[in-house]
Amino acid sequence: MKIFSQKNGKIEKIIREILVFFAIFDCAVSQKKIVKLLGFKKLKLKNDEFRRDKNHEFLAQKNASKNIFNETLKCEKISEKLFARGKFWGKFLRFAPFVRGVAVANSVALQTARKNSDIDFLIICKNNRVFCARFFATLFLQIFGIRRRGEKISQKICLSFFIAEKKINFEKIKLSRDIYLAFWCANLRPIFGREIFERFKIENEKWVRNEAKIEIIFETKNLKSSRNFVQKIFEFFCFGFFLEKILQRILFPRMRRKKAKLDDARGAILQKNILKFHDRDRRFEFQKKFAEILEN
C-alpha cells in the first residue's frame, strides 16, 4: 500500500475523475472510499484542492452544490438499508440450483440510491445453466413478493443480470470507453460465492485499472461458498440439462420479441450464458455526462 503525495499530479487527476463520476449522481465521495479505490494507505491533500464537508470525511469538486454532502449522507443511509434487505434475501439463493454467486450492484452498491430505488442483483450461474438458475431465483423471490415487477420498484429486488462462470470477464461486454462499467465492477457488494468472486476480481482488475485507474474494492475472505449439500440435492433431482433446454425453447422467443419492442435495445443481451435485461443502456448517457462535467 502506498501513501498519496500531493506532488503526484497524476493521482490528483484520478481523484478528480472519481469525484466527477459520483457527481453524475449528485453525490460526494468519502475519503475512505477514495483511498480504497486508489489502493493507497493514506491520503494527504491540500486544504484548498477539493471541497470538503465540515468533518473532513467527504470530498467533492470545488464547484459542487452546498447541499451535496447532506444528500450524500442520505444516499449512503438509504443504500445501507437496501443492501441489508438485499443481503437478507440474497443469502437464501445459496440453496437455489445452479447459482454460484450473488452480488448487489448499481446504485445500492455505489451508495447513490434514493428512496424509490430498487435492489439490483448480479447472479453468477453454473455454465450452461443460466436459464435454470434464473427460473429458480425468480420463483423464490416471486413467492415471497419481493421481486421487482412493473411499477412496483421501491425496495424490490431486480433480477436483471445473469451470467455464467465462464463469462465473468466483463471486458468482453464493455464499451470502447466505459467508465460506468469500471466503477460498477469495482464497487460490487457480493453476498456469497467466495470462489467465483475471487476469480471475478482476477479476471477484471486489469481492464478496470486501465479504464478508470482504480482498484476493485470488494472483499471476499468472509464470503460463504455457494456450494452446499441442499443445493447439490436440488441440482441432482431437477435434471438440469433437460430443464435448461426446455426453458430456452420457451423463453428465448418471448425475450427476443420483448427486446425487439425496445426503443433502445443496447441494454439487453440474450445469450445462452448471459441474460441482461435493461430497457435502455444508460452507460452512453453516463459517459457523456462524465465528459461534460470533467470539462467544466
Image: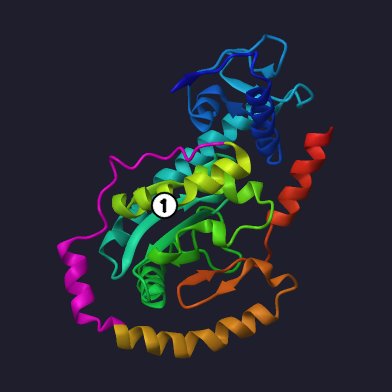
Q: Is residue 94 left or right of residue 189?
A: left
Where residue 69 sits, quadrant-wise, is top right
Q: Looking at the image, which residue sits at the far top?
A: 47
**Residue shown at the point (40%, 65%) measured from the top left:** 166
Q: Percent position (x, y) of residue 71?
A: 65, 31
Question: Quick check: can you spot residue 44?
Answer: yes
Q: Residue at x 45, y 73 (%)?
A: 273
Coordinates of residue 195 in the picture (x, y in percent):
30, 52
Helix, strand or loop at mark 1: helix
| Mark 1 crowd level (few <14, some 14–19, many ≥20, 10 Å Cα) | some
The residue to which callout 1 is attached is: 200
The image quarter containing residue 140 is: bottom left
Residue sitting nearer the eye, 3 or 160: 3
Q: Quadrant of the N terminus?
A: top left
Q: Amino acid at mark 1?
A: Phe
**Of 24 and 165, which appears nearest the observer?**
165
What's drawn in magenta, residue-wise? 214-240
Above/below status of 264 relative to 183: below
Query: Residue 28, located in which quarter of the rendered image?
Result: top right
Q: Is the magenta region chiefly helix, strand or loop?
A: loop
Residue 230 is covered by the magenta coloring: yes
Q: Is residue 100 magenta?
A: no
- In the rendered image, residue 271, in percent from the top left (x then y), is placed at 52, 76
> Which quadrant of the rendered structure holds the C terminus?
top right
Residue 62 horizontal side relative to residue 182, left or right: right
Residue under the image location 35 percent in, 48 percent down: 198
Q: Residue furthest right?
A: 296
Can the viewer see residue 144?
A: no
Badge count = 1
